[in-house]
Image: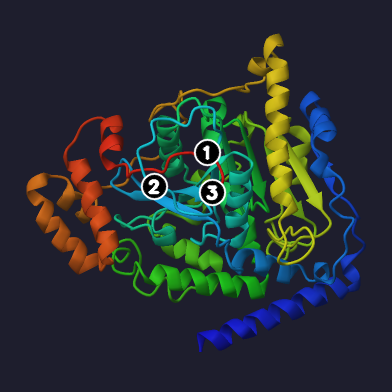
C-alpha cells in the first residue's frame, strides 16, 4: 500500500511540475545566476573571485523543465555510497541527546581519539528538520572532504537514528542544542576554522544561531541551500499540496516511533490526526503555548540584524516546495544587510541544483565552497588594516569564545526534568532507569546501550569539559581524503 502511495505521489509531482512550467502565468525566466546583495567591498570581491557565479547555465538538459523531479532526486534520491560516517553522541544540559556524524572518507578508517584538527577547517552541515540525510547532504560531504574540509553532520534529537531520551523535540528555531554542539566542536578542534551549511528548513536553525550569538558565533562563513526563512507564513499559506502530503506522511511515520515518550507532551491522536504541516507543528510544540508565542521565540529572522557572519543563500525561481508562499526568502533583507548574499538561479527546484543531469554533481556545492574560500581571502586581506575587526568578522577563529551562557538568552527557562532524567540522574537509580527505558521507550538495543553510557557519564558529575571527555566516542584520525 505504501509503495503504491509513493508511486502515485511521484506521478502527481511530475504532472504538477509540468503544469507549473507550461502554465502561461509562469512567465519567462532569466538565463543566468543573479546575485542580490548590498553594495560593499566584500560583494565586489565575491563577484570578482567567485568563478562559480558564472558559466553554470551553458548546458541544457530536458529534466530542467521539471523542478519537482529535480527536488525529489535531491531530497529522496540515493545517498553517496562512498561517504562513511563515525557517530559521536553528545549529551546536552537537559539530558537530551544529539548526534554528530563525522565524515571519514570513502573507506572506513581506524578509530582513535582526536586531540585537535590543527588548521584543517571544519564544515558543519545542518540537514532539514525532517530527520533524513539526503543525497544533497551526502554529495556535499564528499566534495568538502576532497577539498580538504572535515565535514560533520548535526543530527537533532530523535533524527537519523539518534535516541530520543527526553519528551522534547527541537523546535524550528530553537538554537540551544546547536549552540552546545558547536561549543563541543570548538573544544574538540581548537584553532580550526568553522564553516556551516544549512539545508532547506535546517537553514532556519542556522540563522537562529547566527542571530542569537552575533559576533560570538565562532563561524567564519555560512551558506544556506534553498532556505525557508519565513516558516510561519509558509505553513499558514500552505505548502503546495503534493509536497505537503509527502512531508506530512513522512513526519507522521517518523513521529510514530516516539509515540510513547511524547505521550506526556502531546494530546492523544493530535499527531496522527493532523491534516497539514501547521496542525502537526501545533500538535508537537504548541500544547502549552499559543501559535503566536511559539513563533515569537522560534522565528529564524527574529535576530537577523545581529548576524555578523557572511552568509550565502542559494535559491531557485522555480522552487516547488516554497511555491508562491511565504517560504521564499525576502529579497529586501539581502539588499539592506551587508553580511547576507542571495544567489537566484532560474531553475533547480528545491535543493536540486544539478550540474548536467540527475546523476551528476551539484553546482551549488562548488559555489558555496568557492564562497567560503573567497570570504577567507577577503578577511585575511583586510586584517592588517583592522577593517575585519570593525565589521565584526573573525579571520582565524580560535577556541570558541562563547561559554554556555554567553550567547543571547532565548527568553525561556530550561525544560523541566522528565521521568527518564530523574531516573538516571543518580548512580543508585541507574538500573531502575534502564528498566524504564526498556519498558517505556522501547528503544533498540544499540540505542539503549548509547543512553546507558551517556547517562552514566552524567551521573558521574563534573564540569562540562570533563563530561565531554567521558562521553565522547573515539573519533577517526584526520588523514585527508582517500
Q: Position of residue 408 (x, y in %)?
A: 47, 30
Whether pointer 1 and pointer 2 mark residues with C-beta atoms closer than 8 Å, the reply is: no
Q: Distance between the residues labelled 1 and 3?
A: 11 Å
Regarding mark 3 in the picture, which secondary structure is present there?
Answer: strand
Q: Nearer the viewer, residue 259 or 394?
A: 394
- Label tally: 3
> Which element carries disc 2, helix, strand or loop?
loop
State left or right for residue 251 relative to residue 25: left
- Find residue 110 and name its label: 2
Q: Which of the pair 411/352 is nearer the observer?
A: 352
Please tell me which of labels 1 and 2 falls first in the chain: 2
At label 1, counting other C-alpha atoms closer than 10 Å, the crowd grade (few under 14, some 14-19, many 20 or more) is many
Secondary-structure class at tag 1: helix
Q: Where is residue 278 in the image (x, y as percent from the top left)?
A: 54, 64
Q: Which of marks 3 and 2 is nearer the N terminus?
A: 2
| Residues tagged 1 and 3 counted as in contact (Cβ below 8 A) | no
Amino acid at each position: 500500500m505504501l509503495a503504491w502511495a509513493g508511486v502515485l505521489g511521484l506521478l502527481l509531482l511530475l504532472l504538477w511540475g509540468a503544469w507549473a512550467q507550461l502554465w502561461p502565468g509562469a512567465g519567462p525566466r532569466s538565463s543566468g545566476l543573479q546575485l542580490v546583495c548590498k553594495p560593499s567591498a566584500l560583494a565586489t570581491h565575491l563577484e570578482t573571485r567567485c568563478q562559480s557565479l558564472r558559466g553554470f547555465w551553458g548546458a541544457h538538459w530536458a529534466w530542467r523543465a521539471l523542478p519537482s523531479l529535480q527536488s525529489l532526486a535531491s531530497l529522496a534520491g540515493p545517498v553517496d555510497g562512498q561517504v562513511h560516517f563515525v557517530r559521536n553522541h553528545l549529551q546536552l544540559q537537559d539530558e537530551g541527546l544529539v548526534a554528530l556524524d563525522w565524515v571519514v572518507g570513502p573507506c572506513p578508517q581506524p578509530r582513535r581519539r582526536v586531540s585537535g584538527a590543527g588548521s584543517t577547517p571544519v564544515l558543519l552541515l545542518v540537514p532539514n528538520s525532517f530527520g533524513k540525510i539526503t543525497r544533497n547532504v551526502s554529495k556535499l560531504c564528499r566534495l568538502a572532504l576532497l577539498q580538504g574540509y572535515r565535514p560533520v553532520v548535526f543530527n537533532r534529537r530523535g533524527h537519523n537514528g539518534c535516541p530520543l531520551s527526553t519528551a522534547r523535540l527541537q523546535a524550528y528555531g530553537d538554537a540551544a542544542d546547536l549552540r552546545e554542539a558547536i561549543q563541543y566542536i570548538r573544544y574538540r578542534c581548537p584553532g580550526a576554522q568553522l564553516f556551516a551549511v544549512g539545508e532547506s528548513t535546517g537553514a532556519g536553525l542556522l540563522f537562529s544561531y547566527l542571530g542569537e550569538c552575533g559576533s560570538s558565533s565562532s563561524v567564519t562563513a555560512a551558506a544556506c541551500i534553498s532556505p525557508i526563512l519565513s516558516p510561519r507564513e509558509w505553513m499558514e499559506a500552505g505548502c503546495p499540496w503534493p509536497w505537503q502530503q509527502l512531508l506530512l506522511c513522512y513526519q507522521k511515520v517518523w513521529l510514530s516511533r516516539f509515540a510513547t515518550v511524547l505521550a506526556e507532551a502531546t494530546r492523544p491522536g493530535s499527531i496522527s490526526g493532523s491534516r497539514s504541516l501547521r496542525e502537526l507543528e501545533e500538535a508537537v510544540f504548541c500544547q502549552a503555548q499559543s501559535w503566536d508565542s511559539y513563533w515569537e521565540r522560534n522565528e529564524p529572522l527574529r535576530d537577523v540584524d545581529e548576524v555578523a557572519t557572511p552568509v550565502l543563500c542559494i535559491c531557485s525561481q522555480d522552487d516547488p516546495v516554497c511555491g508562491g508562499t511565504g517560504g521564499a526568502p525576502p529579497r529586501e533583507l539581502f539588499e539592506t544587510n551587508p553580511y547576507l548574499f542571495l544567489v537566484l538561479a532560474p531553475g533547480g527546484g528545491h535543493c536540486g541544483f544539478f550540474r548536467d543531469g540527475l546523476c551528476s554533481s551539484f553546482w551549488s556545492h562548488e559555489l558555496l565552497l568557492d564562497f567560503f574560500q573567497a570570504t577567507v581571502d577577503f578577511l585575511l586581506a583586510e586584517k592588517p588594516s583592522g577593517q575585519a575587526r570593525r565589521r565584526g568578522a573573525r579571520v582565524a577563529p580560535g577556541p570558541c569564545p562563547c561559554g554556555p551562557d554567553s550567547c543571547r538568552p532565548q527568553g525561556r527557562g530550561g525544560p523541566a526534568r522528565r521521568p527518564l532524567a530523574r531516573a538516571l540522574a543518580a548512580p543508585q537509580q541507574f538500573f531502575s532507569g534502564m528498566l524504564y527505558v526498556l519498558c517505556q521507550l522501547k528503544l533498540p538495543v544499540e540505542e539503549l546501550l548509547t543512553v546507558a553510557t551517556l547517562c552514566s557519564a552524567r551521573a558521574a558529575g563534573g564540569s562540562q569539559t570533563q563530561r565531554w571527555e567521558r562521553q565522547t566516542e573515539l573519533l577517526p584520525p584526520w588523514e585527508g581524503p582517500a
